Image (cartoon, rainbow, N blue to C red):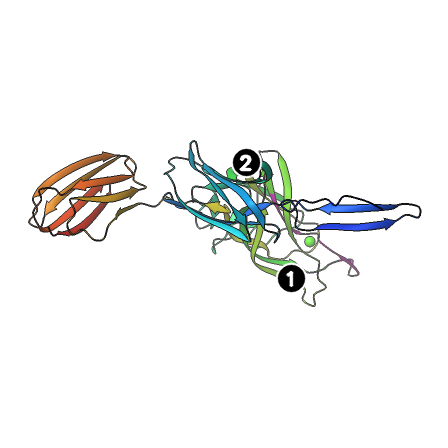
Amino acid sequence: MGYSPLYSAERTDTIYMSVIESGETDTLISNVKRSSVDFDSMKFDNTVFKAVVSKNHSKTIKGAEMRIVLAGTDTLLDTLITCDFYDFISLSEATGIPTGLSYLTADIYLSKSGTLLSHVKEYLNNGEVIFSDDFSSDLSKWEYKSANWLINANSQLYAGADNKYLNNMDDSIVSNEFLIYPGTICSLYIDAYLPSLEFIDDSIPVFDLDGLFIKLIKDGADTSILDFVSSGGALSKEPAMRIKGWREYVFNPTSVENANIFLQFISDSVITDSGVYISNIKISPKFYYAESTSITREDKNVIGRDKIKYSITGIPGDVDIKIITIDGRVIKQYNLNNAPSAELSFSGVPSGVYFVIFEAGKTVFKDKLIILK
Ligand SMILES: [Ca+2]
């Protein structure tokens, strides 16, 4: 039997081959595993973008071309790395400052000889928790509820009355709308007391009749069940079952979508217990950026320098800069608008101690310099 082996070191980790014996002729099966890449970690704090990218197999991709694009309304970073791709590629790149965006996207394009092998897109939000409620005050973060949803004295949300649930309940509560990103993590802290088994006529055990559905609504229509915290299940010796702790769900929409959390408590017509209490809900993005503010002098050593450079990050708008003497005289003044850096001239300034004051709204930064000439 003659055949040409498939050779594609860049696209595959291993080519699995097997022969199926079918009597008269043999059939050769090959299984080609495609290379794919993913972000292991990603950190973006509006001055620098740091990422570690790995692939799904251990085969080295020689001469890999990896393009990474970070974009908001404008492209903040578009970099091409050409290298032999061993286990991982890490990069650290200076970036611009995003303003007023609800999200950024980060793309990896992995190519070899102009052929795209893998593309992955991730979303970064602006560091805010997407949705959270600790039920410490009211239900203002919820846009709809049927009767029987209450917050108790321990700041727990539950369905029922007087810290117990009732028979024949079917009560829903829907959160305000929020944005979800691929990889968004939803955490709920639950403390539940439910009958472990329910008996009808003292003889027949019945499972899963009372409990809380946790659902996700996407774009106001598409509802999926994340969990059902319910009675029954384990054959416990205890008449009541306790479920306590954080429960975590990962949302993976294909792009940024509007969503709501939908809680629905149901019970049958016999046997009740305390019920399901929720003390915290947190929904956070997988990746986010933090808008940090800093003014940094680029050189520690200022001896013999006529010009001193500062880099400014995360301060949009006007920045007033004053150079003052130790006795408070303003000797130079500058005004910058949205500048990423400032170069201050000390030409003609005699040796001595000076303060450089940066003011931008509430942000004040002071630097002390000893000028020696
Ligand atoms: Ca029941």
To which residue does mark 2 refer?
257
> Which residue type carries mark 1?
Met
Residue closer to the observer: 250 or 115: 115
To which residue does mark 1 refer?
241
Q: Residue furthest right?
A: 24
Do tag 1 and tag 2 residues touch (Cβ < 8 Å)?
A: no
Residue 179 seen in render: yes
Residue appearing at x 54%, y 35% in the figure: 258
Residue closer to the observer: 56 or 366: 56
Magenta region includes residue 199 = yes
- The residue range painted magenta reads 198-215
Q: Position of residue 137 (x, y in %)?
A: 43, 48
Within 10 Å of the Cα at label 2, are there few (<14), some (14-19), or many (20+) other Cα atoms? Answer: some
Residue closer to the observer: 147 or 243: 243
Q: Position of residue 66 (x, y in %)?
A: 52, 42
Cα separation between marks 1 and 2: 36 Å
Residue appearing at x 62%, y 52% in the figure: 57
Residue 290 seen in render: no
Magenta region includes residue 88 = no
Query: What element does badge 1 sit on?
Result: strand
